Every structure is written in structure tokens, then in C-alpha cells.
Image (cartoon, rainbow, N blue to C red):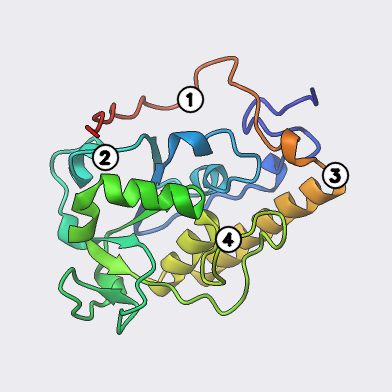
Amino acid sequence: MLPACDTCRRPTVACVCDRIVSYPTDRRVLILQHPQEQDALLGSAQIVLASLPRAQLVVGLSWRNLGHALGEEDVDPHKWAVLFPDSEAQSDVTTRRGAPLDPQDLEGILVLDGTWSKAKTLWWRNPWLNKLNRMNLRPTKPSIYGRLRAEPRREYVSTLESVAAALTLCGENPEIEAGLSRVFRTLMQRVRDANLAPEERKLPRRTRPPRGPKPPRPNTPTE
């Protein structure tokens, strides 16, 4: 087994902790991560979490509502938007009824982390997501993943790219998107340079508990 970084758990040859820069933002970011995405070598959520002080990651399959996912009772879901493709959307951000919404009015952005099939699983297991405002990004270029991790459609990009573009849309400093993208490109290049095979694209299990508060335990959905 290749030696791994104690912080990101990636093999040291693919670690990008040396490139992480902290970017303050006005808006919060909540990442709901599918449990099977925790050990993905090519996962980008860890970079977002390390780079954005106002970002939070919660692992699970279902939660009662936004407040439950955040671990907070006093949260206004009308000030949040979920990133999810909508081919019928007429504007970048819409209310649950389809009316246009100014993205600069948002206080938080929610993103589902996982492959497209895993993201759809999270979407269907959490019907309250459909009641949030919807942010529909329209990427103008392919994902930085390239051929390392193919997605069904051109507009399906990584969690990092989605969050970065959403923050720019909301009026945050464009350097945040540029900086996050630079780190992600570095990760992809180091993975290529290390010639990591598909069977090596899983991170080793943690040998110690992760830092930070323990996220709220999700409900177990009934089938």
C-alpha cells in the first residue's frame, strides 16, 4: 500500500494539501455526501471543505429536513438553494415554483456529493430537497475530471466545480472559483503522474477519528 497523507488520506504522491488556500465567503456551503463516496480518491469534497471555512460536510443517506442536516434548528430554507440539474429551468436560480430568484439573495448552497447515480439516490431519499430553491448551472466546458471519471452528460461536473461556479454566480470573489479549480487540476495531474490504477482509487480507512464536530446521525429510511 502506498504511504498516505494523515490529513486527506490520499497517497502522498497525489496529496494536494500543500496547495490548499483558505477563502472566506459570505455564503455557507453544505455538502451531503453519499456514504460510498467517502473513500473516493478522486473525490473533490475534501478540497472544498479544507478551502472554505463556511463549508460543512455531512455523510449519510437521509435527513428530516435542512435543519436536521445542518444540525441547527434556526435555519431559513427559503434562503438556500440546492444544486441539481433542471432541463426545464428558465433561469440560473428558481424558487420551488419555478419563479426566477436573484442568486445574491441566497445565504447557503447545498450540493449532493457522489457519482451521478449516488446523487440521484440522495435526491430521491430526501423529498424535502425538492422544496428548496433550485440552482441550475450551465457549464461551458467539460469537467476537470476529463477521462479519469466520466459522467453521463457534459454539464455534470465535480462537486468542487459545482460549488465554485455557484459561489461566483452568487457574487463571491471569482478568485475563489479560480483557486479551487487550480487545486483540483493539480490533484488530477498528480493522479495521472502517479499512474494510479482504478483498484488503487480508494482511500485507506482512517486510523484515527476525523477532526471537527460529529455530524448528526441520519435517519434510516424505510424501503
| Residue 186 horizontal/vertical position (percent) | 74, 54
Marks 3, 4: nearer the viewer: 4
Q: Could you tell whether 68 is left or right of 152 in the image?
A: left
How far apart are the two marked residues, 2 and 4, measured between alpha carbons?
27 Å
Q: Secondary structure at mark 3?
A: loop
Q: Identify the residue under disc 4.
A: 151
Residue 74 appears in which quarter of the rendering? top left
| Residue 201 horizontal/vertical position (percent) | 70, 38
| Residue 49 horizontal/vertical position (percent) | 49, 44
- Is 36 drawn above or below residue 178 in the view shown? above
Mark 2 residue type: Ala
Q: Nearer the viewer, residue 168 or 45?
A: 45
Q: Secondary structure at mark 1?
A: loop
Marks 3, 2: nearer the viewer: 3
Mark positioned earlier in the residue sequence (2 or 4): 2
How far apart are the two marked residues, 3 and 2, measured between alpha carbons?
37 Å
Q: Mark on residue 195?
A: 3
Residue appearing at x 30%, y 72% in the figure:
104
Q: Mark on residue 69?
A: 2
Q: Secondary structure at mark 4?
A: loop
Q: Mark on residue 162?
A: none
Which quadrant: the C terminus?
Answer: top left
| Residue 190 horizontal/vertical position (percent) | 79, 48
- Is 167 drawn above or below residue 126 in the view shown? below
Q: Identify the residue under disc 1.
A: 211
Mark 3 residue type: Asn
- Is 194 drawn above or below residue 202 in the view shown? below
Disc 3 packing (10 Å; few <14; some 14–19; many ≥20): few
Residue appearing at x 75%, y 32% in the figure:
11
Mark positioned earlier in the residue sequence (3 or 1): 3
